[in-house]
Image (spheres, helix red, strand yellow):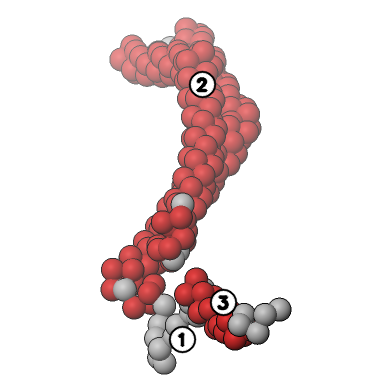
Amino acid sequence: MSSSLRPALRAVLFAAPLFLGACASTSSPAPAAAEPGAQPKAETDPAKKHAVTVAELELKKTLQENQSKLTKKRDALDIAERELEAKREKREAFATERKLELEEGALGLDRSRGRARDSELELAELEAMYAAEEFAEKTKELVLQRGRRNLEHAQRGLAIEEGKLALLTKTELPAKERALVLALAKAEQSVAAARRELELAELETRIAELKAKESLRKAQEPDEKKEKK
């Protein structure tokens, strides 16, 4: 190598490391150190803090409303079920009640028949007695008239009891039974409706809770992450 080129070569070799270091520092600058006491933007941004607070309150409000709504629906179902049980017991007791009412009606009819028969026999006995013996005409007529009146009343009472028993058997008891059957069916429908409403309320409250939680999650999400999305 010529002696004239040696000084130039040394200069190039000496300057190369300095040049490469300068290029590296220019292309990849070191990250700046965080200032002491600095907080994330999400915690210092007033709008961000407000949005998070509102989302938290909305979630709390949703949970309380859900609890109140479900409590009302469960109470309504409980009441409907108790009413159904009462209607069912009343319907089951009707068989015994029907039997007692029929027996009572039959007893009243038998009593009326007995009174009518007794009055008829008493009148016949009086007529026979007054026909065989001599009595004052006025006394005889009064006694027989009273006997005939008693018989007439007994016969009218008998007719009334027969009518009452017929009405009870053919109209009143069947109508009462139909009313009990209808009331029981309505109570069963009320229970079914209350159960459906409770199931629907459970779905609605679950959806509302999920939406409120998602809103809170989004409010808490860093702004940088939202921009990337």
Identify residue for label 3: 20
The answer to whether residue 119 is visible is no
Q: Say which label, 1 or 3, has the lower sequence index.
A: 3
What kind of element bears circle 3?
helix
Q: Residue furthest right?
A: 1
Residue type highlighted by circle 3: Leu
Q: Position of residue 192 (x, y in %)?
A: 54, 34
Q: Position of residue 175 (x, y in %)?
A: 48, 19
Q: Quadrant of residue 114?
A: top right
Q: Nearer the viewer, mark 3 or mark 2?
A: 3
Please name whichever residue, 218 or 132, is drawn nearer the observer in this view of the structure: 218
The answer to whether residue 5 is visible is yes
Residue at 40% from the left image edge and 82% from the top image edge: 39
Q: Residue furthest top?
A: 131
Identify residue for label 2: 178
Residue at 63% from the left image edge and 33% from the top image edge: 92
Q: Nearer the viewer, mark 2 or mark 1?
A: 1
Residue at 28% from the left image edge and 73% from the top image edge: 46
Identify residue for label 1: 33
| Within-10-Å neighbours for mark 3: few <14, some 14–19, many 20+ | few
Residue type highlighted by circle 1: Ala
Cα–Cα gap, marks 2 and 1: 88 Å
Q: For this view, does 114 lie left or right of residue 133?
A: right
What kind of element bears circle 1?
loop
Residue at 61% from the left image edge and 82% from the top image edge: 4
Q: Nearer the viewer, mark 1 or mark 3?
A: 3
What kind of element bears circle 2?
helix
Q: Say which label, 2 or 1, has the lower sequence index.
A: 1
Q: Position of residue 33 (x, y in %)?
A: 46, 86
